[in-house]
Amino acid sequence: MHFQVQKYGFQSLLLTSLVLALSACGGMSDKYQSSGEINDPFEKMNRTTLAVNDAVDKAVLEPVARGYRAVTPSGIRTAFGNFLNNLKSPVVIGNQVLQGDMQGAGNATARMVINTLAGFGGILDLADAGGIEDEPEDFGQTLAVWGVGDGAYVVLPFMGPSSVRDTAGMFVDGYADPLRIYLFNVDKKGWHYGRIGGTVLSERERLLDVIDDLRRNSFDYYAAMRSAYYQNRQALINDSGKAGNAAIEIPEYDDF
C-alpha cells in the first residue's frame, strides 16, 4: 500500500507538471475569455473526432441510456445521480480550497456530511432541500480562477468537448480523487470502473433531450456543441449556474 501511495504521488507530480506546461501554452493563445472568440486551431481534426464520437453514441450510449430511462423510474434515476454526485464531494471540496473559497468549501463539506449520514449515502439530497445548493468545482475551474486561459478547443475521443486547460484539470482531478486512490490501494479497481460506467450512463440519460434538441435544431452541430461547451464552462467558472442548470449542458465524462 505504501508503494502505491508513493506511485500515485509521483503520478500526481507528473500531471501537475503537465498542467503547468499545457496551461502556459493555453494561456498564451487564449482568445475566448478576452473577446468571446473561441480558439479552435484543430477544427478539422475536432470535427472528425466528433463524428466518430457521435457514431459511437448513436450506436451504443444513446440506446443504453434510453433503455435505462424506459425501465428505471425517475425517482430511482435521481437517487442514483445524487449518490454518484456525492462521491465527488472530496474533489469539489479540494478545489474550493485551492480557489480560496472557504465558504464554498464549508458548504460542500456540509453537503457531504448531511447527505452521506442523513441522506443514506447521498441518494437523498437533503442538503439541497435545506438550502445548501450544489456548486460543482473541478481543477479546470481552479486553473481558470488562477488566471489560466482556456487554450485551444479540443474534442477528446469518446469523451467529448474540452479545452487544453480543462483536459489537464480533468486528469489531475481523476488521479487526485481520494476515493479512486483508496479503491486502487485496496485492490478494488472494479468498483472504480463501475463508478465511471454509472456516471456515464446517468449523465447520458440526463442529457438525452438536450442532445436531441441540438442535433435536430442546429445548422452546424459541431459549432453548436462547441458554443454550448464554452457557455456551460463559463457559467460554472463564474458560479452563475447551479449544477444541472448552467447554460446549455453537454456531456462531460470527467471521472477516471
Image (cartoon, grey):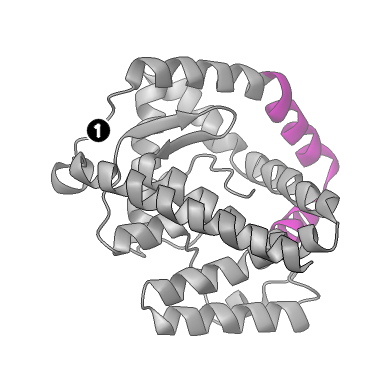
**Is 85 situated above or below 212?**
below
- Measuring 41% from the left and 17% from the top, which residue is drawn there? 45
- Measuring 43% from the left and 39% from the top, which residue is drawn there? 162
- Measuring 45% from the left and 29% from the top, which residue is drawn there? 155
Residues in magenta?
59-81
Q: Which quadrant: the N terminus?
A: bottom right
Asked whether 113 or 143 is in front, the reply is 143
Occupied quadrant, residue 124? bottom right
Residue 247 in sight from this viewpoint: no
The secondary structure that most of the magenta stretch takes on is helix
x%, y% of residue 125?
Answer: 67, 72
On the picture, is 256 further left or further right than 20? right
x%, y% of residue 56?
Answer: 65, 20
Q: Which residue corresponds to mark 1?
A: 39
On the picture, is 233 further left or further right than 26? right
On the picture, is 106 further left or further right than 26? right
Q: Residue furthest left?
A: 35
Asked whether 163 or 219 is in front, the reply is 163
**Is 117 situated above or below 83?**
below
